[in-house]
Amino acid sequence: MGRINLTPLRVRKRALADLQANRIPTPPVWLEVLADVPPAQILTRQQPQQHPLVQVRTKSLPDGKTEQVAIAAPTRKPKSSKRSRMFAPVEITYEEDQLRKQFFQDHPWELARPRTVLETTGDQHKNSDYSKGLQQPTVPLSGESVVQRQLHLLQTVPDITTDQAYDIARREFYTLRRQEATRRRIAKEEALHMGAQPERSILHWSMQIENKHYNDWEQWSKSQVMEQIQRSAAFSGAVAPEAEQKMLGGDGQDPRGARRADPFVAEAASRAGIMTGTL
């Protein structure tokens, strides 16, 4: 207790000794890496590196020219001032994070749209030029397109505010979404005109499964009510509905005399939609 553990400093030395003594057949793959990047010799911990948020803006100069300037935003205070959080890594933030948060707060249903996250090379963004608009040849339209378009406007248009750039990108996004909806509607109308049979929706299949379960439950409930009626009739001495028709004569009168069924049986039968009749 209280002693400094120096075992990590001797890991490579121990591996070399085991290799010379033939305790291990081959050298470990991390042996040379550990020689290039040895464990820290300084036992005092340093403060974590700060990551200031840098914003690039275009400013108008008095002579009519424009110039791009980098503005370093002040670093946010840590969430906790506890000593245990003193050496915790500082959160890395980008300007796109706040823009993305604002867009998806205003358009939460954009997150429900199916997206293809599989990439071929991962370099699709290199062919994107958001100075021409939101529609890019290799990137499907999504909320990320609005974020990148807004960021491009903030960095290139002189003296533009965040709200103005957001309104421009948002209007372009709405226009493209309306065009997509119009193309889908026209394609559906043309397909129906040519005799295509539309595929049933997920809602239709779910309602069909729900109806089947409801019908099964209805049959089960009727059998349970009928069993309860028969049990109650046997206990009270009344005649069950199936045996009533057999005991009734041609004129519909009970040869043993008129007698009403038990009230509990009639109430249970009426709830199940079964008419018991009068003896």
Image (cartoon, rainbow, N blue to C red):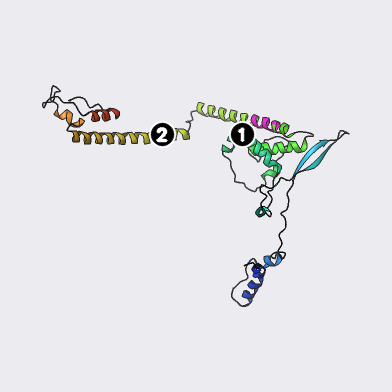
The x and y percentages for residue 64 are 86, 33
Left or right: 255 in relation to 83? left
Q: What is the crowding at mark 1: few (fewer than 14 residues within 10 Å), some, or many (at least 20)?
A: few
* Residue found 20% across the figure and 31% down from its top: 242
Residue at image location 31% in from the left, 36% down from the top: 220
* Spot occupied by residue 181 in the image (x, y as percentages of width and height): 59, 29
Q: Quadrant of the C terminus?
A: top left
Which residue is drawn at the image coordinates 66% and 36% (left, top)? 102
Q: Amino acid at mark 2?
A: Gln
Q: Which residues are magenta?
A: 167-174
Secondary structure found at label 2: helix
Q: Is residue 236 magenta?
A: no
Question: 71 or 65: which is nearer to us?
Answer: 71
Q: List the residue tagged with mark 2.
A: 208
Name the N-terminal-most of marks 2 and 1. 1
Q: Which residue is the site of mark 1?
A: 107
Which residue does the image show at 75% across and 37% down from the upper left? 154
Furthest residue toward right: 63
